[in-house]
Image (cartoon, grey):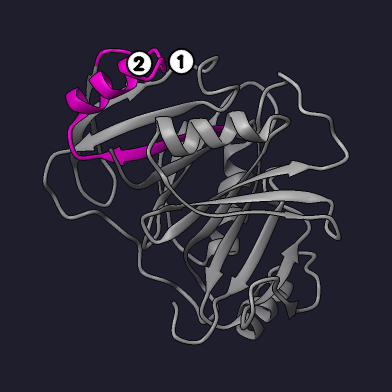
Amino acid sequence: MIAALDRIRLQTGDLTAAVGWTECLLARSPVADEEMATFALDNMTLELTLVDGDDGFAGLAFEVANADEARRACERRALKPTAPVAFAEAGLGLREGHRVDLDVAATFGVPLSLVEYAPTPPPHAAARADGAVTGLDHLVIRTTHPNRAAALYGARLGLDMRLDRTEPKWGARFMFFRCGDLIVEVVHNLNEEPSDAPDKFWGLSWRVANAEAANARLKQSGFDVSEIRPGRKPGTRVFTVRDNTLGVPTLMIEPSAGRT
């Protein structure tokens, strides 16, 4: 049903400041107006929306081939979808399509949408600097009920589960779901008893071709960043961005050799 991650939506009470820091973070230029800014990367889009409230996560959208078929599948899987709604968005090029929103209670607190686009080339903004973010490597969702989350993202949404591992030394159970060329990671803290509490969007890992260049660029731009260290996946190198990320825990990752 799902072909790829379409976008991540973040909200902010200060769009001007958020756009400025996000431009520096990604080294990409947005399409922006007074209420919204869109950053189109190689494998997804980041959308910032002005709200009268706190900074943070606002929702995910996945791309599907056919909105009507996706809605029927979601109805059969108790996801309580809306009817498809037509939309048109201007950005790096006009894109039209249909959107289906899923009931947030059925997705356990994480706002999810499915979008079908008319067949037009997807936009993306050219990188502006060495060490620019090329795309998203993975997004992280924290759950208090791992079996419930496994059923949602695997069985009901149809994402390909590539890993289900419990690591006592890290105090967590990790589930990786392949979505296009990135990963939806679901994490359960082993110190928490399973409960019916809502799942929560937790963080983003952005992909860079050169960790040193990205680290130096962000330091020069005024970000508080950690030193570069080996990632958990063999051959990767990572560093943490500690501030100016709209309250979203943020990691930069240089993939292992042979993967970009």
Q: SS class of the residue under badge 2?
A: loop
Residue 75 visible? The answer is yes
Q: Residue at x 63, y 80 (%)?
A: 211
Identified at 88% across, 40% down, the residue is 191
Pick the residue in front: 146 or 107.
Answer: 146
Q: Quadrant of the N terminus?
A: top left
Q: Quick check: is 59 in the magenta stretch?
A: yes
Residue 81 tag number = 2
Kindly identify the residue that appears in the image at 61 percent across and 71 percent down.
253
Residue 2, percent from left and from top: 32, 41
Q: Secondary structure at mark 1?
A: loop
Q: Is residue 34 visible?
A: no
Q: Tell me if residue 97 comes above or below residue 16 in the rendering.
A: above
Whether 198 is among the magenta residues is no
Question: How many neighbours does mark 1 have within 10 angstroms: few (below 14), some (14-19), or many (20 or more)?
Answer: some
Label 2 crowd bin: few (<14), some (14–19), many (20+), radius 10 Å: many
Query: Which residue is nearer to you in this view: 191 or 42?
Result: 191
x and y, in percent, of residue 9 in the image: 50, 37
Amino acid type, label 2: Pro
Q: Earlier in the sequence, mark 2 or mark 1?
A: 2
Q: Are marks 2 and 1 in contact (CB under 8 Å)?
A: yes
- Residue at the far left: name it: 119
Q: Which residue is mark 1?
A: 103
Q: Is residue 161 above or below residue 81?
A: below
Magenta segment range? Answer: 58-83
Q: Amino acid at mark 1?
A: Asp
